[in-house]
Amino acid sequence: MALDWFVLNLTHSGTAVGWAAGLQFAPVLMFGLWGGVLADRCDRRTLLLWAQSLYAAQALLLTVTVLSGHAPLWLIYVLSFALGSVFTVENPARLSFVTDLVGGSLITNAAGLSILSLNVARLIGPAIAGVLIAVIGTGGVFAVNAVSFAVVLAGLLTIRPQPRPAPVERTPWVEAGVAGLRYVAVRPELVAVFTIFGLVSAFALNFSTTLTLFAGRVFDVGSRGLGFMSTALSVGTIAGTLVATRRASPCVRTVVIGAVLFGVSEALAAFMPSYLTFLALLLPGGFTLMTLNTAVSAFVQSEVSDAMRGRVMAVYTVISMGGAPMGGPVIGWISQHTGVRWGMASGAAAAVLAALTVALWLARQHAAPRPLLRHRAHRAAAAVPPPALPHAPPLTPANSSVFDPTSTGGMTHD
């Protein structure tokens, strides 16, 4: 949030804010599949230690350049891209590491709690930053962020996960990355879930851009008001995640309903006339968002094998995060030329349309004609008795099943 606020004050351009957000996820789109290969072939705890160390270095460099007054826009873009490059490895490794810690039986609940901790940090953190910016400035907030990585690294050093079997796969690097896509492509329900969440993430989850513009241009509430927006969203997020983690087995229907409800909540918030009503609509927006997010993560992790977990979670990362380089600038451009409200509403419309389209496609998949014809043929055969064979022996209990289409010796269900 501090980075977006800094870019907005530096350029006074919604498009520039969108690019700063989008560049953080451009490497995910470019290299994300191979981050999953590393998560499958290397020790995940070691990967996380390296990734968090690189995060800390990037945060420290950003702090020094901003506090020294030598932070041009191009350098902000470079540092945003560097942050995303580390994320391509860190995110699939972290998501897969959850399963290493708790095992498959608890993955649904653990995935929800993992998302809860991550999103509470992302949403409560900006709320705190909104207050700190007014007190110590954006450079001071960057400094606090850099120091915080010492706590993260200390926490990782205390974790002792169960040892994993050494990977035996020797697939070439390029083919190993594409294998994750092949694994997903032959599973229609995974394709459906990834399609919905990818479009929602690209166009409807640009809160770093839209909330900043709402605070600065629509309601003129400054950084403090932006912090309260993040707080309202975080309250809904916490409630939605706690409810979602109670579901034992999330399904595609949960994802579809969550996307529709989230899109409707976001569209209503976009046209609220006052700052207070806007805050009120952010609560159901956060609730439905986490219902969707938790259902997607738990469903995906419960559907994959451990040997492919890192690569499938890399596909998850690419689809959910990699759309931001396209969606962020698009929403920023719409906000710049047609108004901030229409920028947020267009993202909400994309979420609803994606969910309804995928639901219709899945309905047609489940209503394929061939199984239906076979079922009707079976019912017709059961209703019409077979013709008598010439010179057939009289029916007795011993041989009556020959002509009984409902018995195990006659026509069977497909």
Image (cartoon, rainbow, N blue to C red):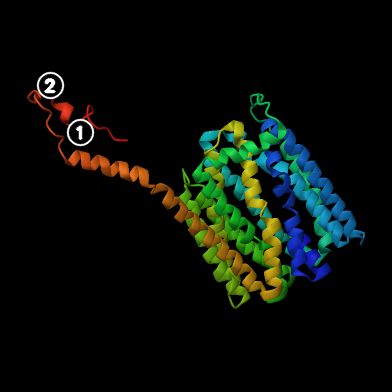
Query: What's the residue at 63%, 49% (across, down)?
Result: 319
Q: Is residue 217 above or below residue 228?
A: below
Q: Which mark is residue 340?
A: none
Label tally: 2
Name the side, left or right, on which 124 lies relative to 378: right
> What separation in Å lies between label 1 and label 2 (alpha carbons)?
15 Å
Q: Which mark is residue 398?
A: 2
**Helix, strand or loop at mark 1:** loop
In primary-sequence order, the first of circles 1 and 2 is 2
Q: Position of residue 385 (x, y in %)?
A: 15, 37
What residue type is disc 2 on? Ala
Q: Viewer-proximal residue, 365 or 31? A: 365
Q: Viewer-proximal residue, 143 or 360? A: 360
Q: Which mark is residue 405?
A: 1
Q: Position of residue 240 (x, y in %)?
A: 53, 55
Q: Looking at the rendering, which quadrant does residue 231 occupy?
A: bottom right
The single residue placed furthest to the bottom in the displayed view is 273
Q: Quadrant of the N terminus?
A: bottom right
Marks 1 and 2 close (CB-CB < 8 Å): no
Q: Is residue 219 visible?
A: no
Q: Position of residue 169 (x, y in %)?
A: 66, 26
The single residue placed furthest to the top in the displayed view is 398
Name the side, left or right, on which 18 lies relative to 355: right
What residue type is disc 1 on? Pro
